[in-house]
Structures are given as structure tokens and as C-alpha cells.
Image (tube, grey):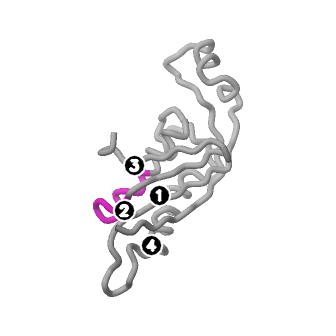
Amino acid sequence: MLYVSKRIRFSASHRLHNPLLGADENRRLFGECNHIHGHGHNYEVEVLVKGQPDSTTGMVMNLRELKEVLDREVLARADYSCLDAPEGLLGGRISTTENVAIAVWEAVAPHLPVGALHLVRVHESENNIVEYTGPDAI
């Protein structure tokens, strides 16, 4: 099995906040990340696809096609946005890095061959990284 990776970057703001909880509980759970005005990150997202090389092209997947999917399904919805917006990439979920990884998977997977998506890795910062291997792995 071969694994091929494509990396994209986007900048977005967010606020860690659960509307079902009170202000004190949100501050206790999320600390400074619950600031009323939010904060931002320069996210780095890696998408790994798996497969065998095509006998005609020698590629597991054409990276140009994967880039087009990422541009359309992730960057167009997340770059220079507020991740907390209900119409955005996260669709109203709490904007943790974990939920960003799940949302990227859900946005990209339907546009790839069945079973090709192997991993989504999201770097929120140099020290905070989340990996998601899909709903079947949970």
C-alpha cells in the first residue's frame, strides 16, 4: 500500500464555546480560548490518500485533482473565515481542532474514490496536532 499526502494552509478565527453551557463553565473548560472576541490560527492540514499506483499513470491519485477538491471543499469554506459560523466548514460544531479534522474528512471523502482517504492531520499550532482516520476507526 502506498500513501500520498497533500498539504494546504488556511487562516481562520474561532472561539471555543458551548452555547449549552453557562459563561462560568465555558471559561472553566476553555480558558483564554473562550475569549468573547475569539482568536485565530494559521492551520495546516494534511490529507493522506492510500492505494496502489494506476498502471497507466503510475499515481495513487493525481495530486492536482486532490488539490482541486481541497481548494473547493475546504479552503473556499475555511480560509479567512470564522470557524464558528453555522454555514462554515464546521456547520455549527464547537470549533476544536478535533472537529476541524472531522469536518475536513467529511468535506473531502465524498469527492475521492471509496476507501482512498486514509488520514486527515490538522496542525493548529506548532505544538497542537490532531489526526483523524475516519468514522470506521472509532
Q: Which residue is the site of mark 3? A: 133
Residue denoted by label 2: 111
N-terminal label among 4 and 1 = 4
Q: Secondary structure at mark 1?
A: helix
Q: Secondary structure at mark 2?
A: helix
State yes or no: residue 116 in magenta.
yes
- For this rendering, which residue is in front, 72 or 25? 25
First reached walking from the N terminus: tag 2 or tag 1: 1
Q: CA distance from mark 2 to mark 4?
A: 10 Å
Residue type marked 4: Glu
Frontmost of labels 4 and 3 is 3
- Mark 4 or 1, closer to the camera: 4
The foreground one among 82 and 61 is: 61
Of residues 57 and 69, the one nearer the viewer is 57
Residue 73's disc number: 1
What is the x, y in percent for residue 8? Answer: 58, 61
Report the amino acid beneath label 2: His
User: Which stretch appears magenta?
Assistant: 105-117
Rounded to the nearest angstrom, the CA distance separating label 4 from label 1 is 12 Å
Q: Which residue is mark 4?
A: 65
What secondary structure is found at the residue carrying circle 3? loop
